[in-house]
């Protein structure tokens, strides 16, 4: 058993469900889960109800995060069918622009290619563009970004086709980054009979060969991001199963297990979960912030005691070789291995508005 200190981790892809989905998660519970998982900064996606696509909704979401967040939070704005000419003005108060090119739930899908090109062209270089672009759509999106000299970050790469497309574009010199989720690195569609609806996620769990390709092309992957997307157990077992699964509390233990197994070095883990996310999204360092972990002792992940409001994980029963024993944010212990000690509202909202503006 070895104790190791890591920098505070950054998850660049989470869905904290507020506003509109507070029964699944909110800023207080989602950031408690982050802290319990050694994550001290999260970037929150825009597909809430209502979606974060204009100044009023972005200001309102900042206010919610400021009241509830226990760790630092940045907030995405979303491209929509009617904000291509205005969304760029929100960049000073957003961590990035998210464009849903493939199917998504809600009003944020942009599948008109002329509109998509305007969204890419109009977004300023001061903040990243993140796209949900899968399969055969991906090369066309890369071509649009290349035409307008805009760097892209590709969310949740899941298949051999996608990572090979990204690797070829990077080798050709295109400015491009990407992320992969722990569940696509660990699980495949062969796990679906065991998981049932708890394994329903987008992008879908892929074939074992796709998982092997993600590890094979690891040098082309820039971030590990959870795509934390909680739903209640009642929703997951309903007739209309919503896709998505929680991941904030299991991400680091799973990646530490890869370290213990020799598939990943500590230097790679730090790059994927701290250094690269900060660089890509232009995030300032958090002073006196770190995570103490234990590596080597094997244990099974348990759904009991989770901080996420949904209260379940698809990794229940999976053996891991790592756990978080302490999280420190700006010199204060915010998780002691058993309890979250940070109060709602003690985190910081990145690129915030003045309170009087809200």
Image: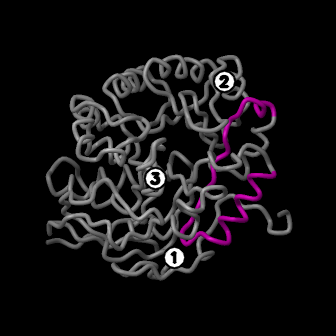
User: In the image shown, does 25 or 299 lie closer to the viewer?
Assistant: 25
Where residue 123 sits, quadrant-wise, is top right
User: In the image shown, does 237 or 269 lie closer to the viewer?
Assistant: 237
Answer with mark 3 or mark 2, whichever residue precedes in sequence: 2
Q: Residue at x 73, y 50 (%)?
A: 92
Where residue 70 sits, quadrant-wise, is bottom right
Where's residue 215, x and y in %?
A: 25, 37
**In this view, the mark in front (1 or 2):** 2
Q: Secondary structure at mark 2?
A: helix
Please identify the residue farthest to the right as the structure is shown: 356
The residue that mark 3 highlights is 228
Q: CA distance from mark 1 to mark 3?
A: 24 Å
Q: Residue at x 38, y 41 (%)?
A: 200
The residue that mark 2 highlights is 116
Where's residue 285, x and y in %?
A: 52, 63
- Specify the segment rendered in magenta: 56-85
219 to the left or right of 243: left
Q: Residue at x 63, y 53 (%)?
A: 75
Q: In which quadrant is the N terminus drawn?
A: bottom left
Q: In which quadrant is the C terminus drawn?
A: bottom right
Q: CA distance from mark 3 to mark 2?
A: 26 Å
Q: Could you classify mark 1 by the number of other residues whose Cα lies within 10 Å: few (under 14), some (14-19), or many (20 or more)? A: few
The residue that mark 1 highlights is 330
Q: CA distance from mark 1 to mark 2?
A: 40 Å
């Amino acid at each position: 058993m070895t104790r190791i200190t890591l920098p505070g981790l950054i998850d660049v892809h989470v869905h904290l469900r507020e506003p509109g989905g507070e029964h699944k998660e909110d800023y207080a519970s989602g950031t408690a889960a982050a802290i319990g998982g050694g994550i001290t900064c999260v970037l929150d996606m825009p597909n809430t109800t209502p979606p974060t696509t204009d100044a009023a909704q972005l200001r309102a979401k900042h206010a919610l995060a400021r009241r509830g967040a226990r760790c630092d939070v940045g907030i995405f704005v979303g491209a929509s069918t009617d904000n291509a000419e205005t969304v760029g003005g929100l960049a000073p108060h957003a961590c990035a622009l998210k464009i849903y090119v493939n199917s998504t739930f809600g009003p944020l899908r942009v599948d008109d290619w002329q509109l998509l090109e305007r969204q890419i062209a109009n977004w300023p270089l001061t903040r990243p563009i993140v796209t949900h672009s899968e399969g055969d759509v991906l090369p066309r999106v890369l071509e649009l970004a290349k035409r307008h000299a805009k760097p892209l970050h590709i969310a949740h790469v899941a298949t051999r086709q996608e990572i090979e497309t990204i690797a070829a574009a990077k080798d050709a010199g295109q400015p491009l980054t990407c992320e992969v989720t722990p569940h696509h690195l660990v699980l495949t569609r062969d796990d679906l009979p065991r998981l049932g609806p708890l394994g329903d996620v987008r992008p879908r769990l892929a074939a074992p060969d796709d998982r092997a390709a993600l590890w094979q092309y690891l040098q082309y992957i820039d971030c590990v991001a959870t795509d934390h997307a909680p739903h209640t157990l009642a929703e997951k077992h309903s007739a209309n199963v919503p896709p998505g699964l929680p991941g904030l509390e299991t991400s680091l233990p799973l990646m530490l297990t890869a370290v213990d197994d020799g598939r990943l070095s500590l230097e790679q883990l730090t790059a994927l979960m701290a250094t690269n996310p900060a660089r890509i999204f232009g995030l300032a360092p958090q002073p006196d912030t770190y995570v103490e972990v234990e590596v080597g002792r094997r244990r099974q992940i348990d759904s009991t005691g989770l901080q996420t409001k949904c209260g379940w994980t698809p990794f229940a029963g999976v053996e891991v070789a790592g756990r978080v024993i302490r999280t420190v944010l700006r010199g204060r212990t915010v998780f002691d291995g058993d309890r979250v000690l940070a109060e709602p509202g003690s985190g910081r909202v990145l690129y915030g508005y003045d309170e009087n503006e809200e």
